[in-house]
Amino acid sequence: MAAHASGSTLVDAISTAIPAGGPPPAGPSPGADARWAQIDALADTFAAHLHGLETGVPGQKERTALASLTATLSSLRAAILAYRAAPGVETLGALRSTVSAFETSLGSLRTAAGVETPSPGTPPTPA
C-alpha cells in the first residue's frame, strides 16, 4: 500500500527532526530548514496519495478510516507549524501526540483495507 509507505516515511522524517527526549533545543539546529522543507514535501506527497485513494475506496469502513487519516494529517500539519513557530515543551508535546495519533490512523487504514502489518524486513501481504 503506497499510502502507508508514504505515511511511514513522513513519520520517520518528523521523528528525525524533533528532539528524542526532553525540551527542544534553545536555537535552531543546523539543517533544520531543509529538514522541515523535506517534511512539507513528504506531507504534500502523502496528501496526494490520500486524494487518489478517495475515488477508489470500496467500503464504508475504508472510507471512514481514510477520512480519519485525512483529518489527522491536517492536525499534524497544524502541529508542525505551531512547533516551528514557537518551539517549546508544550508545542513539542502536542507535535509528538499528533504524530502518535497519525500513526494510529495510518494503522487503522491498513487494517480497514485488509493489509497486515509486516514484521521488519517483510513486505506487506493482504489479509
Image: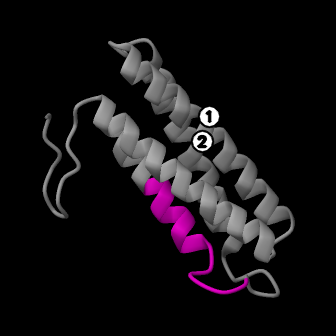
Most common secondary structure along the magenta stretch: helix
Amino acid type, residue under disc 2 in the picture: Leu
The residue lying at 44 percent from left, 19 percent from top is 63
Identify the element where label 2 is drawn. Answer: helix
Residue 55 pos. (x, y %):
43, 12
The amino acid at mark 1 is: Ala
- What is the magenta range? 9-23
- Nearest to the observer: residue 47 or residue 90: 90
Crowd tier of the residue under label 1, counting other residues whose Cα lies within 10 Å: few below 14, some 14–19, many 20 or above:
few
Q: What label sits on residue 71 in the rendered view?
A: 1
Rendering colour mode: one colour
Q: From this view, report whether residue 70 is shown above or below residue 42.
A: above
18 displayed left or right of 106? right
- Which residue, given by chain and number where applicable, does mark 2 sit on? 73
In x, y percent, where is residue 2?
33, 38
> Is 20 included in the stretch rendered in magenta?
yes
Q: Quadrant of the N terminus?
A: top left
For the point 54% across and 32% down, the residue is: 68
Badge 2: residue crowd in 10 Å (few <14, some 14–19, many ≥20): many
Are the residues flagged by discs 2 and 1 in contact, CB closer than 8 Å? yes
* Residue 112 belongs to magenta span: no
- In the rendering, at what x and y percent does residue 66 appear? 47, 28
- The answer to which of 59 and 37 lies nearer the viewer is 59
Residue 112 is tagged as none
Residue 121 visible from this viewpoint: yes
Q: Is residue 29 above or below residue 5?
A: below
- Residue at image coords 64%, 50%: 40
Q: Is residue 33 visible?
A: no
Q: How many numbered discs, if any?
A: 2
Residue 61 point in image, percent of width and height: 38, 21
